[in-house]
Image (spheres, rainbow, N blue to C red):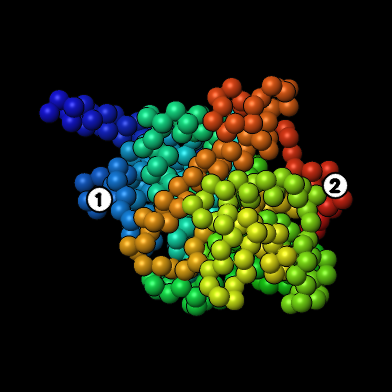
């Protein structure tokens, strides 16, 4: 058919563009270079080939092949890079999806999603692969996705803990096997902490994240977890952390109103999070599906407090599945429950970071007349918790 010949020609052209691009472009910061391993599309498994993606779990090699195939098929919309390696030497892949994937554009914010920090919390890992798929395949047909990618750079890290995932078992809902990295450190307790000294030995995965967010000025972030259904926001720790096993009072950040807004946008766009239903008897119900982190339970060395206090990046933690590693046949349902993720990225950015000069900018996330300004920085940078006074 003529149309398939055209498609083949376009693919060939895109592949050529990719091969040229990987040798002539670099990401905006020279620290990170695009992945230069071209993919022989003929070797890619039949369905997960950058055009389609099956609802099943992907091990590290399959995940790597999938990301490379997307990168080969959509060179104008994506760039694949690694921010470092895990303890066991697996790449910590990040795919940036944007109409300008290779360079930061002033006024176009960088946002990120990080999943699978706990290796046995596997749903977010697959959801980010499907989100990548959704973004790249919708750019030409969905005006909203086009607008989003024209005005944002979205960096997606499907797995921050590939070593933990490698030993985790499908179907395990509640245990902690695979949660930690290969040296048995909990990566979401491994960051510097403002409230309490964190004596844990820094791990390669957290060191890579720290360098990453020091190089790219992210303004928003979602950290994807499993085991509950709630959007949790800073602070995770509290000045009274000495009583941490007893304290369940909120630890309020200077931008509490914005954090609550961000969390509510996610919760309200999720199929059921906002109902505040507890996962099982005895586990907490969260009003409107959101909670202050410390009010749930305080923790030291968490990633979201670090993002906010050290770098002014407003990160929230998204607990998206009651079961940490549900059977693969349930993944399609989880995608349906969470498929508003890109809308969330957009909606959260719109009201939170409107261009200050444009007072007529409507709060609608689908408006094409608004743009954002990264000059609007979180209050914490001007408040009592000035990042420059925090020692690492
Ligand atoms: Zn977790």
- Cα–Cα span, label 1 and label 2: 51 Å
Q: Residue 24 carries which label?
A: none
Mark 1 beta carbon near ligand 1 (under 8 Å):
no
Q: Residue at x 39, y 56 (%)?
A: 333
- Quarter holding residue 265: top right
Q: Residue at x 69, y 69 (%)?
A: 297
Q: Is residue 85 visible?
A: no
For the residue pair 301 and 26, the one nearer the viewer reads as: 301
Mark 2 beta carbon near ligand 1 (under 8 Å):
no
Sequence-first tag of 1 and 2:
1
- Quarter holding residue 4: top left
Q: Which mark is residue 383?
A: 2
For this orientation, the residue located farthest to the right is 384
The correct choice, above or below, for 40 with respect to 370 in the image is below
Q: How many C-alpha atoms fall within 10 Å of the one at disc 1: few (<14), some, or many (≥20)?
A: few
Does residue 312 appear to the left or right of 386 in the view shown?
left
Give x and y (percent) for residue 348. Answer: 62, 41
Q: Quadrant of the C terminus?
A: bottom right
For this orientation, the residue located farthest to the left is 1
Q: Which mark is residue 47?
A: 1
Q: Which residue is drawn at 43% across and 34% down?
A: 77
Q: In which quarter of the image is the N terminus?
A: top left
Give x and y (percent) for residue 237. Answer: 75, 65
């Amino acid at each position: 058919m003529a149309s398939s010949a055209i498609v083949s020609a376009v693919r060939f052209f895109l592949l050529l563009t990719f091969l040229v691009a990987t040798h002539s472009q670099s990401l905006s910061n020279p620290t990170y270079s695009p992945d230069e391993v071209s993919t022989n599309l003929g070797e890619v498994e039949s369905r997960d080939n950058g055009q389609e993606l099956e609802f099943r779990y992907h091990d590290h090699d399959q995940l790597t092949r999938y990301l490379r195939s997307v990168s080969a098929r959509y060179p104008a919309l994506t760039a694949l890079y690694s921010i470092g390696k895990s303890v066991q030497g697996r790449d910590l892949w990040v795919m940036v999806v944007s109409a300008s994937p290779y360079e930061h554009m002033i006024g176009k914010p960088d946002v990120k999603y990080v999943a699978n920090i706990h290796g046995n919390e596997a749903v977010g890992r697959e959801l980010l692969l499907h989100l990548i798929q959704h973004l790249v395949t919708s750019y030409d047909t969905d005006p909203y996705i086009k607008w989003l990618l024209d005005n944002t750079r979205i960096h997606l890290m499907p797995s921050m803990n590939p070593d933990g995932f490698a030993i985790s078992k499908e179907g395990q809902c509640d245990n902690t096997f695979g949660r930690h990295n290969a040296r048995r450190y909990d990566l979401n307790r491994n960051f510097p902490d403002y409230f309490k000294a964190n004596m844990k030995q820094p791990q390669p995965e957290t060191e890579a994240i720290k360098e990453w967010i020091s190089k790219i000025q992210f303004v928003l972030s979602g950290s994807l977890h499993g085991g509950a259904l709630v959007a949790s926001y800073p602070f995770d720790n509290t000045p009274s952390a000495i009583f941490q096993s007893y304290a369940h009072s909120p630890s309020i950040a200077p931008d509490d109103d914005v954090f609550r807004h961000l969390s509510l946008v996610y919760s309200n766009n999720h199929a059921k999070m906002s109902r505040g239903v507890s996962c099982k008897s005895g586990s907490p119900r969260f009003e409107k599906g959101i909670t202050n982190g410390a009010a749930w339970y305080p923790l030291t060395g968490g990633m979201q407090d670090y993002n906010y206090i050290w770098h002014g990046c407003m990160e929230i933690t998204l607990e998206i599945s009651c079961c940490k590693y549900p059977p693969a046949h349930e993944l399609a349902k989880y995608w349906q429950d969470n498929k508003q993720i890109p809308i969330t990225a957009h909606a959260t950015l719109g009201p939170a970071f409107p261009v200050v000069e444009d007072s007529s900018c409507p709060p609608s996330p689908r408006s094409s007349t608004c743009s954002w300004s990264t000059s609007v920085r979180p209050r914490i940078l001007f408040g009592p918790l000035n990042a420059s006074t925090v020692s690492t």
